[in-house]
Image: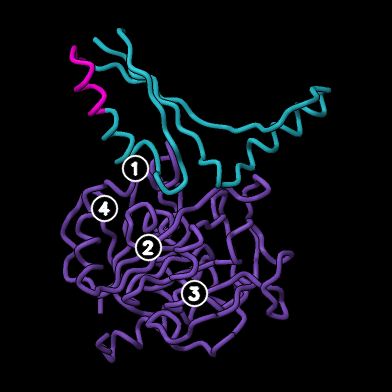
Amino acid sequence: MKFGVLVFPGSNCDQDCAHAIKDVLKKSVTYIWHQDTDLKGLDCVILPGGFSYGDYLRTAAIARFSPVMKSVTGFARKGGTVIGICNGFQILLEAGLLPGVMLRNRDLHFICRYVYIRTENNDTRFTGLYNAGQILKIPIAHNEGNYYIDAAGLKELKGNNQIVFRYCSAAGEADEQSNPNGALDNIAGIINKKGNVLGMMPHPERSCERELGSRDGYFIFQSIIKWLEKRRVW
Amino acid sequence: MLKAEINISLKRTVADPQGLTIKHALESLGYKGLADVRMGKSVVIRLNLKDKKKAEEEINGMCKKLLANPIIEDYHFKISKA
């Protein structure tokens, strides 16, 4: 089983992701430079956080045209497992692999702190090891995490059970006070219709070890591993 | 040579926190009667082209593909002699 972490100029969570996969989950991982087009038989592609291309123009606007993204799009269309975290999520949105866009945070601040999110859909290859409604403590670090989609798009997301995580209080209430960035309907993570592409603003790779304050993100990767081992067919 | 001045702004239906913050700041400076402030960005491109129509086509394509995100942004441009 092989994981690949994409590296764009300006990615800065690539090593954290590789560390989580290699040192914590003990699986093989390789870096894929944004100009490479060969995904080398990977089982799972991770788009890490950071500031690809300095966030010039719009977050992720330029990264989506990197040569590697053509291969990632092909991989995703064929059902390959793709997870985008933070800036990686923004890239998946700009590339059209997930619906919607990110606006600047409601209060115009860069927010870097722990938040709580509620597992809204545990019937995915990314969340299979969580209980339905499980509350996770997991850090965010972003300036553009204010998820937006039009009313028709939101209806579709809800109808297809594509909302995987919502920001919530420690007790699990997805209310306005526990929404850090103004994201529509408290959305913190969504999946595509087919169920093989996940985008999330919180950082599971930063919450894989107890020493870092939370281990709640660990099970995202562990869920993927378990799913890949079983090779469930969608 | 032609020059394209492109203006990109958030759609009216999309909240613009930057514009809102600027509005509050202007109001605190004593400017009254501001109905609305919207923030945008401007891109100026000089083109090695003579044909205005061709330039319009190209700029339109650039806006759609890269410069603006049509889900949340509108764009306008003006092409003139550089």
Residue that numbered label 2 is attached to: A98
Locate residue B64: give its quadrant. Answer: top left
Classify mark 1: helix, strand or loop: loop
Query: Residue A59 appears at what percent x and percent y?
Result: 44, 45
Q: Residue at x 56, y 79 (%)?
A: A216
Spatial distance from mark 1 to mark 4, Cα to Cα? 15 Å
To which residue does mark 4 refer? A33
Of callouts 4 and 2, which one flags the residue occurring earlier in the amino acid sequence?
A: 4
Q: Quadrant of residue A187?
A: bottom right
* In this rendering, position of residue A216 left or right of residue B60: right
State the residue in front, B7 or A56.
B7
Of A202 and B8, nearer the camera is B8
The label shown at residue A158 is 3
Label 3 vs label 4, nearer the camera: 3
Under mark 1, the amino acid is: Ile
Query: Which shade is chain B?
Result: cyan
Q: Are marks 4 and 2 on the same chain?
A: yes
Q: Amino acid at mark 3?
A: Lys
Q: Position of residue A106 (x, y in %)?
A: 65, 50
Discs 1 and 2 share one subunit? yes
Q: Is residue A56 visible?
A: no
Residue A62, which numbered label?
1
Q: Circle 1 marks a residue in which chain?
A: A
